Amino acid sequence: MDNQFYEVETSMNQLDTDERVRDLLILGVPPDKAKQVVSSIKRSTAPMRYDWMWISSYIVIITLALFIIYLYSNLDSVNKRIDGLSYASQTISNDLETPDPIYPTEPLVAELNVDGGVDRQIAKVGEAINYSYLIANTGNVTLTKFIIIDNLNTMQVLDFVLAPNSGITTPLTTNHTVTHFDLPGPLVNQIKVLGISSIGTVGLSSTREITNELAAIDLNISLYTDVFTVTQPISVIFSIKNTGTVNVRPNSIRYPNVNYPIRNDGLEPGAIYSNTLPLSVAEPGPQEYEIEVSAEAGTNIIITDSEKIKFIVAVP
């Protein structure tokens, strides 16, 4: 390949020489002189054909050398920039892959506690039971409104402020009067409190149950006939039933101006005591008597019940 290139280049040089000699001959230069001139010119210009290639190579080599010297002299700075780019790239990657942290916050919780009491343990029909209770805020939010739910009374709505971990010092009160509909008992009062904060957080207390035993008896009387003669003895058949939840002891049965003691050891809930009661009638005609029985239920608790009977006393 190199030989072929050399032959082509030699041929080109020969053509250039002939053309120059011809030009000089046209100008009237003698042949020997023309060849001598062209030969001297060729020798002076031939080395310059490849000067541009060497110059370009020198420039490239010098540029590379200067660049290498620059990199070497600034190696620490370059490394720092590379490290900075790597850190920035890693940070961006982490930001894209890692979600924003969720910082836990304490939830607002409304919690209440109710503690209650009662003024008596045993009650009878017609008697009022008085309840009292205290409210404590055991949550972490201030409460400003309270709804009192009492199964024996109407619902109450109260407005006052109760801070977290605090309670009222003056008891709230309510009452209930015992009726025959509460029998046989026991009577259970269930109290719950609903607390509401100013931002709408709602809390419901556990149910506070207050139980009362009920003392009650039921008197039943009957006659074997409703017409008697003046000389005929009259006996009333009566029975006393314990309709409460505590033991009772009947102690007497009476009608106007007459009181008969009852000998009995006591009746358990649901037990019945029966006997007869003699009546004394002075005048003939229609008669109406109210008979009342009494019993003891605990210390200083007297319960009673009564019933009316009607009959006729005829003249023989």
Image (cartoon, rainbow, N blue to C red):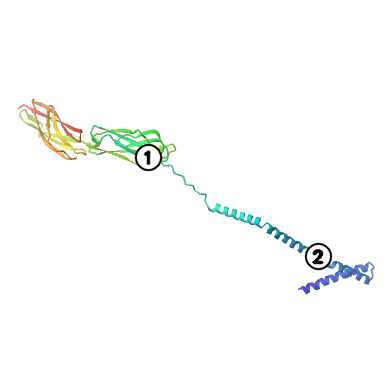
Q: CA distance from mark 2 to mark 1?
A: 102 Å
Q: Is residue 160 left or right of residue 74?
A: left
Q: Secondary structure at mark 2?
A: helix
**Residue type, numbered disc 1:** Leu
Residue ID for mark 1: 112
Residue ID for mark 2: 51
**Is residue 41 among what the camera can see?**
yes
Q: Outermost residue toward the bottom?
A: 3
Q: Quadrant of residue 240?
A: top left
Residue at x 85% of width, y 70% of height: 15
**Residue type, numbered disc 2:** Asp
Vertical side of 100 occupied by 180: above or below? above
- Picture coordinates of residue 303, whole percent (x, y): 19, 33
- Picture coordinates of residue 140, whole percent (x, y): 42, 40
Point out the tag, 2 or 1, that comes first from the N-terminus: 2
The crowd level at tag 2 (other Cα within 10 Å; few <14, some 14-19, many 20+) is: few
Residue at x 93% of width, y 68% of height: 26
Residue 209 is marked as none
Q: Are marks 2 and 1 in contact (CB under 8 Å)?
A: no
